[in-house]
Amino acid sequence: MKPQKNLGIWMDHSIANVIDLKSKTHNQSIESHFDFEIKKEALAKSESLMHNKKQQMDDDYFKEISDVILNYENVILFGPTNAKTELHNYLELDSHFKDIDIKVVPSDKMSKNEKVAFVLNYFYN
């Protein structure tokens, strides 16, 4: 029996920490490019433009994360905001992810070691 490929992703709307326990470094980060400066600049033009810009940049952020998820069989999305649920909804619309077991679990802000321990505990306990 071949070992399962498991992945944990702690995320909020600004950063996703990708935790692969079989990787030497355990952790890579994917950052959203929608920051305060972009929000301020878009909002100065119009609120509608700001919302459109945020949606476009969130889609880019989710696409970058989803490209990583495609290489795994089991994924846990966790974090303190609803970004994990938004990503899950985004993935459910794409048939490429139908055979990947993706779970969403609420959690608090955590240190790097706490995130790794959370993923370890989820998949191996």
Image: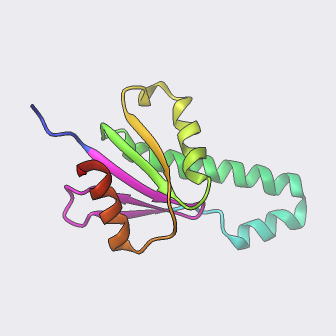
Residue 99 is situated, as x and y percent measured from the top left of the image, at 36, 26
Q: Is residue 84 magenta?
A: no
- The number of numbered badges drawn on the structure is 0
Residue 117 is situated, as x and y percent measured from the top left of the image, at 30, 65
Left or right, 43 with reference to 80: right
Picture layout, residue 31 above or below residue 72: below
State the extent of the magenta-drawn residues as a range: 6-30
Which quarter of the picture shows residue 112?
Answer: bottom left
Picture layout, residue 101 above or below residue 95: below
What's the residue at 32%, 49% (across, down)? 7
Picture layout, residue 5 above or below residue 106: above
Which quarter of the picture shows residue 80?
Answer: bottom right
What's the residue at 51%, 45% (across, down)? 63
Residue 70 is situated, as x and y percent measured from the top left of the image, at 36, 38
What's the residue at 57%, 49% (across, down)? 60
Residue at far front of view: 125
Magenta stretch: dominant secondary structure: strand
Give the colour scheme of this rendering. Answer: rainbow
Residue 89 is situated, as x and y percent measured from the top left of the image, at 58, 37
Picture layout, residue 97 above or below residue 122: above
Q: Is residue 12 magenta?
A: yes
Name the quarter where the N terminus is drawn. Answer: top left
Nearer the observer, 10 or 55: 10
Left or right, 94 with reference to 27: right
Left or right, 103 with reference to 43: left
